[in-house]
Amino acid sequence: MQTEVMLMADVKLLGKAGEIVKVAPGYARNKLFPQGLAAPVTEASRRRLAKLEAQRAAERAARKAGAEALATKLTGLSVTVSAQVKEDGKSLYGSVKAADLLAPIEADRGVKLERSQLDLPDHLREVGQYDAKIDLGEGVAVPFKVWIVAENKPEA
């Protein structure tokens, strides 16, 4: 015998918030109901779900507005990184990673970003110009340029 419940939040392998699914009574009683992941299918639970969805939509809209405001601040960004090069004058010792770009971005625009927000093309292992982007979440991404230049060596 199965019980119908309305999901109040997304549940992995079960469904998305707002869906009505059938589950075992024990699973509903012992896991879904106590954790607030689901509720019995009633008119009150439908109203509660509608209220939760409205709150979530407002939160998403606020996050998107914040991301768009940050995007305008980051528009036209170009980051220059100097790195040691091998004798051929083009290949780097090692590579430039996302973590290497965080400090120059913060110094240039005053914006603190997480390493996971930077989307770089593989490993940057040669001198040159690369196209990258910053993912600010909520579908907002800002393209920027990364310039890698040879580091000046002190003469002996």
Image: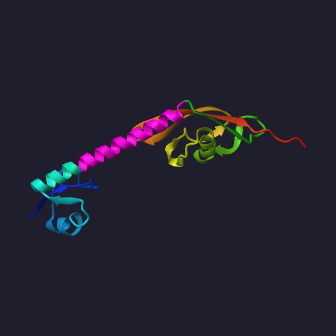
Residue shown at the point (54%, 48%) measured from the top left? 115
Whether residue 76 appears in magenta in the rendering, the answer is no
Where residue 144 sits, quadrant-wise, is: top right
Point out the stretch of residues depicted in magenta.
52-75
- Does residue 85 appear anywhere in the picture? yes
Q: Residue at x 20, y 52 (%)?
A: 49
**Would you place residue 43 above or below residue 62 in this image?**
below
Q: Nearer the viewer, residue 88 or 103?
A: 103
Return the residue nearer the eye: 57 or 149: 57
Q: Quadrant of the C terminus?
A: top right
| Quadrant of the drawing holding the N terminus | bottom left
Q: State the residue at coordinates (23%, 67%).
A: 34
Q: Where residue 8 sits in the image (x, y, percent)?
A: 22, 55
- In this view of the protein, can residue 17 be seen by the observer? no
Percent across and percent down for residue 57 are 29, 44
Residue 98: x, y in percent? Answer: 58, 45
Look at the magenta stretch and give its main secondary structure.
helix
